[in-house]
Amino acid sequence: MPGVEIHYGGETYHIANRDVDDVAAEVLTATRNGGGWLNAVDGGGPTRLLISAGVSVALNNLPAGGDS
């Protein structure tokens, strides 16, 4: 399981060793609970994305051998 690419706020982030269904469930839980933080990585290192209702997030599975 290589990971997930996240598009958030016009930027691209990654989460290693998870799949889209897993991350999507975490995003849905955060929005249902009034918001929450999603841990990811960008080119500069670890980052936290604030997930809440009305925030656009796109998720893509990274192909095997992809940069995660």
Image (cartoon, rainbow, N blue to C red):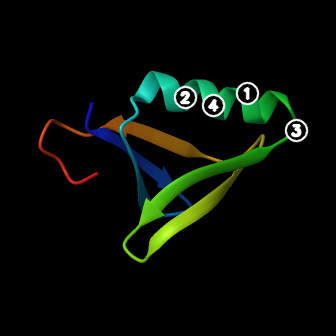
**Vertically, is 12 above or below 15?**
below
Q: Residues within 10 Å of mark 4 (few under 14, many from 20)?
A: some
Amino acid type, mark 4:
Glu
Which residue position is annotated with label 1? Answer: 29
Q: Which mark identifies residue 34?
A: 3
User: Which residue does the numbered mark 4 point to in the structure image?
Assistant: 26
Residue 26 position, x and y percent, is 63, 31
Labels 3 and 2: the sequence-earlier one: 2
Q: Residue furthest left?
A: 65
**Left or right: 59, with 35 as reference point:** left
Q: Residues within 10 Å of mark 2 (few under 14, many from 20)?
A: some
Q: Is residue 29 left or right of residue 46?
A: right
Instruction: Give amino acid for label 1.
Output: Thr
- Expressed as whole percent of the image width and height from the top left, the position of residue 14 reads 39, 53
Amino acid type of the residue that numbered disc 2 sits on in the rendered structure: Ala
Q: Are marks 4 and 2 in contact (CB under 8 Å)?
A: yes
Query: Disc 3 marks which amino acid?
Result: Gly
Q: Which mark is residue 24?
A: 2
Q: Give the mark toward the camera: 4 or 3.
A: 4
Look at the image and tell me in which quarter the N terminus lies.
Answer: top left
Which of the two discs, 3 and 1, labels the residue nearer the N terminus? 1
